Image (cartoon, rainbow, N blue to C red):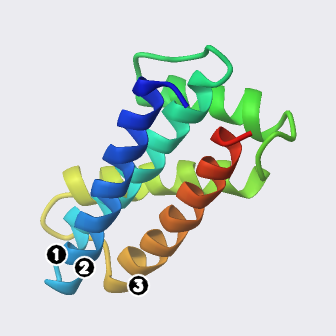
Amino acid sequence: MTPEQQDLMDRAEQSLQAARILADEALFDVSVSRSYYAMFYCARASLLALNLSSKSHSGTISLFGQHLAAAGRLPIEIHRQLIDAERLRILGDYGGANSHCSQQDAQVLIAQSARFMQIAMEFLAQ
């Protein structure tokens, strides 16, 4: 693992830890955002293994889907989860007064981001 990949994985771990703490404090919108970022950092680190990167979230998600999930290098369902996580992050960050993430959203995303991180670590260890 390169230093840049390690930094991204460290950021992912910190984001996941923050997501858990925030969910425990019933700060579900922010917890969802941190879970998404845990997944996003893992996706970026994984793409670097193929010498790929993007300057945007949508570009990163697209490259991840094309070169890692659809190519069979990583499970296709984690790409779908990354897409769904971004949608929830946007809802939590920008949704307005009547649009918030639920406790269930936060709990599901924490579990998914922990699994995403484990899969990314295994991929990067190859």
Residue 91 is situated, as x and y percent measured from the top left of the image, at: 31, 57
Q: Is residue 85 above or below residue 120?
A: below
Q: The disc labelled 2 sits on which kind of residue?
A: Ala
How far apart, in angstroms, are the residues tagged by discs 1 and 3?
12 Å
The answer to whether residue 98 is left or right of residue 10 is left
Within-10-Å neighbours for mark 2: few <14, some 14–19, many 20+: many
Residue placed under numbered mark 1 in the picture: 27
| Image quadrant in which you'd find residue 101 | bottom left
* Front of the two marks 3 and 2: 2
Tell me what residue is drawn at x 29 percent, y 66 percent: 17
The reply to whether the C-beta atoms of the residues labelled 1 and 2 are less than 8 Å apart is yes
Residue 28 is situated, as x and y percent measured from the top left of the image, at: 24, 74
Q: The disc labelled 1 sits on which kind of residue?
A: Leu
Label 2 element class:
helix
How far apart, in angstroms, are the residues tagged by discs 1 and 2?
5 Å
Residue placed under numbered mark 3 in the picture: 104
Tell me what residue is drawn at x 60 percent, y 34 percent: 46
Tell me what residue is drawn at x 51 percent, y 33 percent: 45
Label ID, residue 16: none
Q: Quadrant of the N terminus?
A: top right
Within-10-Å neighbours for mark 1: few <14, some 14–19, many 20+: some
Residue placed under numbered mark 2 in the picture: 23
